[in-house]
Image (tube, rainbow, N blue to C red):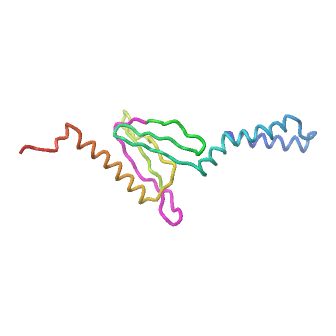
């Protein structure tokens, strides 16, 4: 939406400067104030993510939390509760000759439908993603073993 407004504003400035009486003060205000502000709001965040971006994901047996660090600012920690967690590796092609992808987390809602909970933004090699899924599987295995209803030791 911002891109459409931006393109329309630039088009209006060009048309007015060609067929009008040159650039008025309002147009100079738009060039020197609006364009840098537009860049800071939209493209600036993308630039910071591509240069300095880091993603932090915290997984436990009851919730998934994440925050993103853009180098100069950090987003709030977002906590997403779930009852059951499912995860898949979504392949994104090759980077530097290595198969890469993202990790996608989902859970089932009250109606039993699978709902996307979170997808990582950072593209990692598939082998590294498989290691991460093994670590997540280990967390849930430890929870099952420590559950008092799951009796591991039998007296028989």
Q: Which residue lies furthest to the right in this view?
A: 21
Residue 38 pos. (x, y %):
71, 40
User: Where is the N terminus found, in terms of image quarters?
Assistant: top right
Residue 84 pos. (x, y %):
34, 40
Identify the residue at image location x=39%, y=43%.
59
In front of the other: 34 or 71 = 71
Q: Which residue lies furthest to the bottom in this view?
A: 97
Asked if residue 152 lies left or right of residue 19, the reply is left
Q: Is residue 85 located in the magenta-colored stretch of the structure? A: yes
Residue stretch in magenta: 80-100
User: Where is the C terminus found, in terms of image quarters?
Assistant: top left
Does 123 appear above or below 152?
below
In front of the other: 48 or 96 = 48
Q: Which residue lies furthest to the left in this view?
A: 156
Residue 97 pos. (x, y %):
51, 66
Q: Main secondary structure of the magenta part?
A: strand
Q: Is residue 87 located in the magenta-colored stretch of the structure? A: yes
Residue 58 pos. (x, y %):
42, 42
Q: Which residue lies furthest to the front in this view?
A: 72
In front of the other: 5 or 32 = 32
Identify the residue at image location x=66%, y=42%.
42
Asked if residue 132 lies left or right of residue 100, the reply is left
The image quadrant of residue 131 is bottom left
Asked if residue 114 lies left or right of residue 142, the reply is right
Identify the residue at image location x=50%, y=41%.
67
Identify the residue at image location x=50%, y=56%.
92
């Amino acid at each position: 939406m911002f891109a459409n407004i931006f393109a329309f504003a630039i088009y209006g400035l060009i048309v007015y400067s060609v067929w009008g009486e040159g650039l008025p003060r309002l147009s100079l205000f738009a060039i020197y104030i609006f364009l840098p502000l537009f860049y800071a709001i939209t493209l600036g965040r993308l630039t910071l993510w591509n240069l300095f971006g880091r993603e932090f994901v915290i997984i436990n047996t009851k919730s998934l939390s994440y925050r993103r660090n853009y180098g100069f600012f950090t987003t709030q920690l977002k906590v997403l509760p779930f009852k059951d967690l499912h995860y898949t590796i979504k392949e994104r092609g090759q980077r530097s000759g290595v198969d890469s992808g993202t990790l996608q987390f989902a859970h089932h809602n009250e109606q039993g439908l699978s709902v996307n909970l979170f997808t990582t933004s950072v593209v990692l090699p598939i082998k590294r993603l498989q290691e991460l899924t093994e670590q997540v599987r280990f967390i849930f295995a430890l929870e099952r073993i420590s559950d008092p209803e799951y009796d591991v030791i039998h007296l028989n």
